Image (cartoon, rainbow, N blue to C red):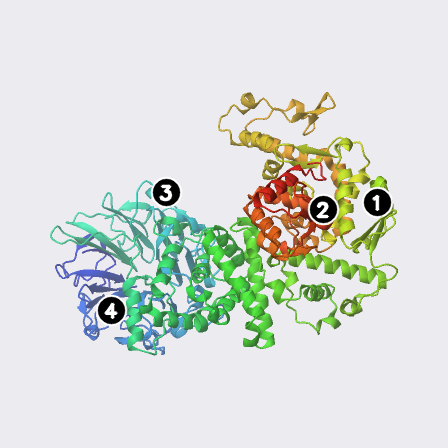
Amino acid sequence: MLCWGNAKDGQLGIGIDRTAMFEPRNCHVFSGRGLKEVACGGQHSTFLLHDGSVYTCGSNSCGQLGHSKPGTSPELVDALDAQIITMVSSGRSHSVAVNEQGQVFAWGAGEEGQLGLGIAEATVRIPRLVKRLCEQRISQVMCGNQHCIALSRDGQLFTWGQNTSGQLGLGKGEPSKLFPQPLKSLSGIPLAQITAGGDHSFALSLSGAVFGWGKNRAGQLGLNDEQDRAVPCHIKFLRSQKVCYISCGNEHTAALTKDGGLFTFGEGSWGQLGHGSTNNELLPRRVLELMGTEVSQITCGRRHTLAFVPSSEVVYAFGCNSHGQLGTGLLGDARSPCAVKTRFLTGTVTKIICGGDHSFLLYSNDQSSVPTEDFRVIGVTKSVSPINCERIDSWRLKLMYNTDSTVTNIIQIVLCFDDTHFKTNPKIPGIDLNSVRKLFDTLSKPAFSGLLEQATKSFESLLIPQLPRSPPDVEAMRIYLILSEYPGLFDSKNYIRLTIPLAMAILRLDANPSKVLDNWWCFVDDHLFTRMVDMYKSIVVFMLTGGRTLLVPVFYENYFVATLRLLEKLHKVNLKAHHVEYNRFYIPDITSLVDIQEDYLKWFLSKADIVSMMRYFPSVNLCAYPFILNAQAKTTMLQTDAELQMQMAVSGANLHNVFMLLTLEPHLARNPYLVLHVRRNHLVSDTLRELTMYSDVDLKKPLKVIFDGEEAVDAGGVTKEFFLLLLKELMDPVYGMFTHYKDSNLLWFSDKCFVEQNWFHLIGIICGLAIYNSTVVDLHFPLVLYKKLLNVSPTLEDFKELSPTEARSLQQLLDYDGCDVEEMFLLNFAITRENYGMTEVKELIPGGEGISVDKNNRKEFVEAYLRYVFSDSVSEQYSAFSSGFLKVCGGEILPLFQPSELMAMVVGNNNYNWEEMEKNAVYKGEYTATHPTVRLFWEVFHEFPLEKKKQFLLFLTGSDRIPIHGMESLRIVIQSTTAEEHYLPVAHTCYNLLDMPRYQTKEILRRRLTRAVEQYEGFSLV
């Protein structure tokens, strides 16, 4: 061991020589005895040997040596002889030690409570047990001038002693503390290290987050000001530096990073910051003179700093040198790093230590094999306990032999194996969720069932209720990801105990931490996200069925709303992250468990703020969470809304009696239907004329169509025929209203047509009427049309659906890697269009013909191209169409739909269930479900490939898609005819009616049906 610096009180342990040592000299007191650690106080030193014995020397003015022997040489602290001590620390005039059981002993000056014994004694000369910490296993303890800070193995932080500058971190106005106090503001953060300066304190997380509090007169907290802090504050400047170790002087601080960089801040009046000046630094600043080297150890004295560079085996010192504490052999302070003289060094440096105004260097000679310490390596024995198989097994055994044992901290951090956890930030959780899964898989084994149940109890009673609104750092947010993997959450018997309370804790989070969790959820794997969605969907069903009986009404309501709001939060995350398809959030059971019409009414009234009505209803409205409602439920909402508007318009109802209106038999004035009188040979003009006579509210009434000169009562078939005939005429290519894209078989508005805009307006109304009258129309528009109706911007993917070839060319332009985009593609911001034999140039932006497309502007070109196709070129046509559609379907319900749902309401969907269609079929004439010909028909039909089945559907119903309510709402009718076998089946599309001769063989039936289906041309343009 080498020592140097102030020896006035014997703190160097070299005997009666009390002159200052300006150059390191050997101290052979512990030669061959296994010296493990040295702690430097103000004027005393504490030495810890590998056998657990403690020696002290130096000033004993307040009993800080723990014995009454002279302090000139290290002497054994007899009172600790029965203990195996593993750690020591020294303050200005007091000392502490920790034994292998994690118990703390303290002695010395205690007037400020720094001994934690509950009394303010000026002098305690014999080490005493700090009883308040007996139930904790302390892994680290550090002394400031007159305060202490301790870290337990399960991650709890305790402080005690003087608090004049807020160094205990307990909050503003808190007095000094005689007993250890839990510092809860950092709970949840896995801490790697704690340290204390004169009157300030620091804590460092496993992932490099640095927190400081206490005195800040010289900027020693690194917060860019000189205000004291009474609670831990995150030093954001150091967040990205991968800090691994911190050391504090009286009023300065040093931080060591994983790459060996050294940052210092705080008081610099003695040069102790090493920046070549005596200025204070309010922000952490890198010591530039050491930048080319890799520092592995740092330590701070009262007003000086040491740093060790292992590659050159050089110890650097800077700062105050009034007592020779720099060991450079020179007089005077050093403002920049200077090499410590080590001519007496006869081995390898293992550790450097300093404190007060003196310093030590431990080294090992060739005979001993003590490795050089690297402060950047986190000591597993001193930080939060890692979870491993041995630890889990020890918990299990504890439970077996001690039934009262509680495992409150089963969840501890499972960090990424690489450096990713150092990058922990609002977008990266830095946690290895696979390890979390393995942990819970282990706990789920039968051998650990008791431990799992104990964990569940701890989560329920301790962990989840204590989750804070504003966690101290993003690292403390990891608990939400860890808990989401806990298998107990998915068990229905724990929904009320654990799963919903966890949702409530998440919803309680302040805005910023809530945003962090959203970001992390964006980056979790799809499997985890899907499990969470499915779990909370299950809870909704649980609450609608058995949950109601388990909770009193006020709790039921709160728990139900929390579940729905958590699903809403996940849904918003999914809109950004696209983990699952939107329909994954659907809860189909809702349509059978809830009266959607009544639920919508309650929601309508709550939005209208009808307070007098709301006392009749609980406030849980599923309609407020439309993402869980499938298209069928939303259609019911749309129809309920239409009925509501009609009732109010016709009866002059006000909001206060609207509920009664909807529960009683409606009394509509004049006519409850929207009746259209039309002539078959003037269908378009008559329809336009008739519709102008009705108000917007009338358009929401059920449609009845009367063809001039025909007596037929419209039971639905006439209306369907009206839609089919009207669309056939409107889609006639002779009018040029739409462009047919052959490679996708889809239609889009034509930028050149021969009809007035009110024709497009009429098609919009027809699409809206189709929705309200549950009629599927065969309109081959792409999904982008419905996106635009819902104000969702078109993308290149939409263009790929409409025009795959053109879109592929645009994609190739975007994907091209070369720099010669201009020469390769020869494009400018203009396109050419054929217009009846004439070629027209259309500029995509003003002056576009003169602007070439290059690597830098190709994205803007694609955006302009899409804007032209979907908006600019057809703005009048689309505007007329959308105004017609919104005239019927506009309102508050429409935005609740997804584009694909809206599309399905107009043109149906392709969720085929052919068995359901057979089950719902109706038979007329001689036919029954068991008739031989009917049986042959269904055998042939079920053998058809999918495309042929869709062709049959088109042949029979006028559309190859099915209504939004599913196959059960599609009822086909098969009736017998007297026609001979050589006749084909005939479809009456308006009535979904099939006239089928009594075919005798399966082969004849197959041939006739196939031919009939293939000959059908349909009504539409496509």
Task: Identify residue for label 1.
Answer: 687
For the residues labelled 2 and 1, the Cα–Cα distance comes to 21 Å
N-terminal of the pair, mark 2 or mark 1, is 1
For marks 2 and 4, give the one nearer the viewer.
2
Q: Quadrant of residue 604?
A: bottom right
Residue of label 4: 100
Mark 2 belongs to which amino acid? Thr
Tell me whether circle 3 and circle 2 mark residues in contact (CB < 8 Å).
Answer: no
Cα–Cα span, label 3 and label 2: 86 Å
First along the sequence among labels 3 and 2: 3
The image shows residue 901 at horizontal and vertical percentages of 64, 50
Q: Can you say whether 294 is above or below 637 in the image?
A: above
Residue that appears at 41% across and 55% down: 209
Report the residue marked by disc 3: 288
Mark 3 near mark 1, Cβ–Cβ under 8 Å? no
Which residue type does callout 1 highlight? Thr
